[in-house]
Image: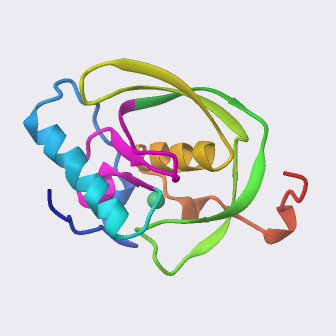
């Protein structure tokens, strides 16, 4: 395993769309291991491959309930809206409020090639949506909203 360099701020790779993964080979497995290590070292809760310079559809997530490696993640359903504070390892100087679904259902393939469908709420939903955005070349600084939109009832 190895720590990979994080792509930051105005790096154009962060604005590009990632390609689906068709073959879960050793390179992808090494990438997943490295992404987890890089994410933990940076104390992040999620990471997407473009953030380490690889335009492939793979994300890692760990909100404190165990690690997920999601290959070709796809958000099938979303419900509700929550505005909450968010940050990103690629924008270390920025935090801000972003509107995300309260609850999602996401489909993905794991490193063994098994397909899964799981539901996530609150931070898990926020994190998966944030990382899937990265795969589509969308970064959270594009989605910042005013603090006045904070939903205190969440
Ligand atoms: Zn991010």
x and y percentages locating residue 40 in the rendered image: 36, 63
Write the residue at 42% across / 31% down.
73
Residue 52 location, quadrant = bottom left
Write the residue at 47% across / 42% down.
132
In the picture, measured across the screen, residue 101 lies left or right of residue 59, that is right
Q: Quadrant of the N terminus?
A: bottom left
Please give the range of residues in magenta.
46-72
Based on the picture, tell me whether residue 69 belongs to the magenta stretch.
yes
In the picture, measured across the screen, residue 134 lies left or right of residue 127, that is left
Write the residue at 20% across / 65% down.
3
In the picture, measured across the screen, residue 24 lies left or right of residue 81, that is left
- Depth check, front residue: 25 or 99: 25
**In the image as oriented, which residue stretches furthest toward the left?**
26
**In the image as oriented, which residue stretches furthest toward the front?**
65
Based on the picture, tell me whether residue 144 belongs to the magenta stretch.
no
The answer to whether residue 13 of the structure is visible from this angle is no
């Amino acid at each position: 395993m190895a720590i990979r360099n994080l792509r930051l701020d105005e790096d154009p790779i962060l604005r590009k769309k990632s390609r689906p993964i068709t073959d879960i080979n050793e390179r992808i497995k090494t990438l997943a291991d490295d992404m987890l290590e890089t994410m933990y070292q940076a104390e992040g809760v999620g990471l997407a491959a473009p953030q380490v310079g690889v335009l492939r559809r793979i994300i890692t997530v760990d909100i404190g309930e165990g690690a997920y490696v999601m290959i070709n993640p796809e958000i099938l359903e979303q419900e509700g809206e929550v505005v909450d504070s968010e940050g990103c390892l690629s924008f270390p100087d920025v935090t801000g409020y972003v509107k995300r679904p309260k609850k999602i259902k996401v489909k993905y393939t794991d490193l063994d090639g098994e397909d899964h469908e799981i539901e996530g709420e609150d931070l898990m939903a926020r994190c998966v949506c944030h990382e899937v955005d990265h795969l589509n070349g969308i970064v959270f600084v594009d989605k910042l909203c005013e603090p006045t939109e904070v939903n205190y009832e969440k």
